[in-house]
């Protein structure tokens, strides 16, 4: 890949919002890539940050776009970056991930091998998460990625390279319905596939998440993903395409869990009061049984102690996921899927040619 | 569904403001001629140009005459290229800020006019 008179072949777009703690490490990892410096341009889109994100990004970026007003989400920021990018390939890299030097060259090589491949994602690696919930969340993401890599259109936006033509033909990221930074990548993957492009996850090419995740972050992410999944995408329709999404990792044991739970409730009804410890033991056994593949993965990666500690958090995440799916389903059936208001639609196709840019309608 | 950014949707529309930052580290020399060649052809647009230098370039007077509309940011000797970029970014007012190293062979492009979909 070489730069020519028209500019670099690859445009790396980094959406960032209040990312001062991670963006330096993220951009350094991009600059440390084994790609020649003249073969790519690095564009950071600052989504109305309150901190020093823009000035820190300027240390390494070729272009910094500053979006003012209210933050509009990573889908919006990526689209604005794509509009000013000049490369034939667009790489989207989150501001809280660190790449390996070979990550981007491998993704570009995967695209070069097959012209029908529209997008290749790197997926999540082990990372160096320090706190417990970051490790738990990383494991969930990785487990899903491993399960879903064999499936179809599974696009992961944390680090992905997309052909420019495929990206614009497919209509960019949906910045209306998926502005919270959840599932917009899955949705784009579905549209890319609809337009005839193959969407791949590059195995053994994971990136490390730099941000720390709290328990509140986990439950918030699960809640938002769950609601969007049933409200805007459809749970069953999406399962065949993005079976590796974390929502399916959490809810896959749902049906056996309900069956076992029913049996347990029946058991508890017929058990004398003195048998409460037995009921608790049965409940614990039930949780372990329905989540056995997940807990085995946790144990293999982090040990038995971590797995035992993760069980309560996993149970809460699963309960949140179920509540979110039901909430999204109710919203879809009683209110409907989200649509932009008419006034904003009128400006929607203007993009970044006028400022401030109005979100596009996909 | 509410707008993703109502204040953006209903605020007056304008062309994006553009700034260019040329970074000249301590051990680099940029001739006035070359600097003029590197700057964008955007005469019809209000473009803010900042030339960020570590120390005072030997031919500062010539550079200032060549790029009369540029703001020269003279940082102390020893300021690294990354620090220069950060300092200049804090001064740059544009919605779209393009940064280029003085010694880099890549020419600046006017991104706001190169928008394409």
Image (spheres, coloured by chain):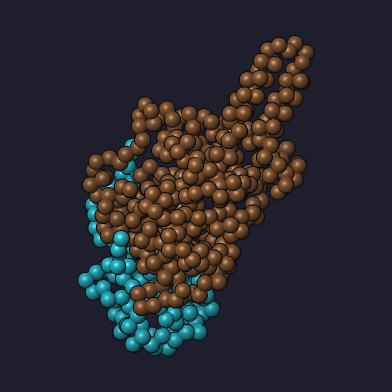
User: Can you say which quadrant of the picture contains the C terminus of chain B?
Assistant: bottom left
**Quarter holding residue A296:** top right
Point 46% across, 29% down: residue: A327
Residue A21 visible in rendering:
no
Residue A269 visible in rendering:
yes
Position of residue A102 in the picture relative to residue A132 (left or right): left
The correct choice, above or below, for A38 with respect to B2 in the image is: below
Point 67% across, 40% down: residue: A293
Chain shaded cyan: B
Position of residue A205 in the picture relative to residue A76 (left or right): right
User: Can you say which quadrant of the picture contains the N terminus of chain B?
Assistant: top left
Chain shaded brown: A
- Residue A222 location (% of width, % of height): 53, 38
Q: Nearer the viewer, residue A291 or A47?
A: A291
- Residue A39 location (% of width, % of height): 45, 73
Q: Nearer the viewer, residue A313 or A207?
A: A207
């Amino acid at each position: 890949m070489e730069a020519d008179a028209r500019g670099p072949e690859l445009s790396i777009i980094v959406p960032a919002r209040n990312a001062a703690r991670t963006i330096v490490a993220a951009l350094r990892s991009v600059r440390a890539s084994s790609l020649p410096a003249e073969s790519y341009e690095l564009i950071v889109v600052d989504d109305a940050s309150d901190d020093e994100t823009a000035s820190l990004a300027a240390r390494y970026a070729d272009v910094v776009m500053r979006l003012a007003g209210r933050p509009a989400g990573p889908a919006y920021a990526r689209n604005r970056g794509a509009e000013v990018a000049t490369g034939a390939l667009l790489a989207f890299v989150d501001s809280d991930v660190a790449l390996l030097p070979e990550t981007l060259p491998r993704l570009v090589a995967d695209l070069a091998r097959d012209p029908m491949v529209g997008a290749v994602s790197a997926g999540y690696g082990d990372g160096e998460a320090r706190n417990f919930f970051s490790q738990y969340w990383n494991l969930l993401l990785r487990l899903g990625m491993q399960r879903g890599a064999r499936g179809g259109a599974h696009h992961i936006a944390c680090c992905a390279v997309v052909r420019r033509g495929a990206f614009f033909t497919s209509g960019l990221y949906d910045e209306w319905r998926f502005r919270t930074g959840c599932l917009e990548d899955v949705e784009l993957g579905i549209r890319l596939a609809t337009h005839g492009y193959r969407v791949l996850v590059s195995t053994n090419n994971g990136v490390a998440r730099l941000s720390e995740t709290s328990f509140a972050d986990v439950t918030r992410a699960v809640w938002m993903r769950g609601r969007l999944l049933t409200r805007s995408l459809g749970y069953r329709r999406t399962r065949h395409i993005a079976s590796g999404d974390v929502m399916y990792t959490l809810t896959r044991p749902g049906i056996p869990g309900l069956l076992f739970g029913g049996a347990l409730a029946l058991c508890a009804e017929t058990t004398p009061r003195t048998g409460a410890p037995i009921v608790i033991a049965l409940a614990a056994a039930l949780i372990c049984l329905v989540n056995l593949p997940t807990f085995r993965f946790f144990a293999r990666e982090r040990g038995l102690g971590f797995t035992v500690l993760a069980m309560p958090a996993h149970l809460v995440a699963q309960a949140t996921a179920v509540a979110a799916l039901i909430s999204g389903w109710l919203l879809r059936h009683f209110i409907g899927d989200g649509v932009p208001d008419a006034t904003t639609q009128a400006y929607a196709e203007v993009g970044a040619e006028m400022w401030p840019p109005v979100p596009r309608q996909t | 569904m509410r707008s993703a950014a109502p204040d953006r949707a209903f605020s007056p529309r304008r062309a994006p403001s553009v700034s260019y930052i040329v970074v000249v580290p301590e051990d680099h020399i940029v001739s006035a001629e070359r600097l003029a060649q590197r700057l964008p052809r955007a005469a019809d647009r209000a473009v803010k140009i900042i030339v960020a230098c570590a120390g005072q370039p030997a031919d500062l007077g010539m550079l200032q005459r060549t790029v009369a509309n540029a703001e020269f940011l003279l940082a102390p000797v020893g300021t690294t290229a990354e620090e220069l970029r950060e300092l200049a970014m804090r001064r740059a007012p544009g919605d779209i800020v393009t940064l280029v190293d003085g010694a880099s062979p890549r020419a600046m492009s006017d991104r706001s006019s190169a928008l394409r979909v």
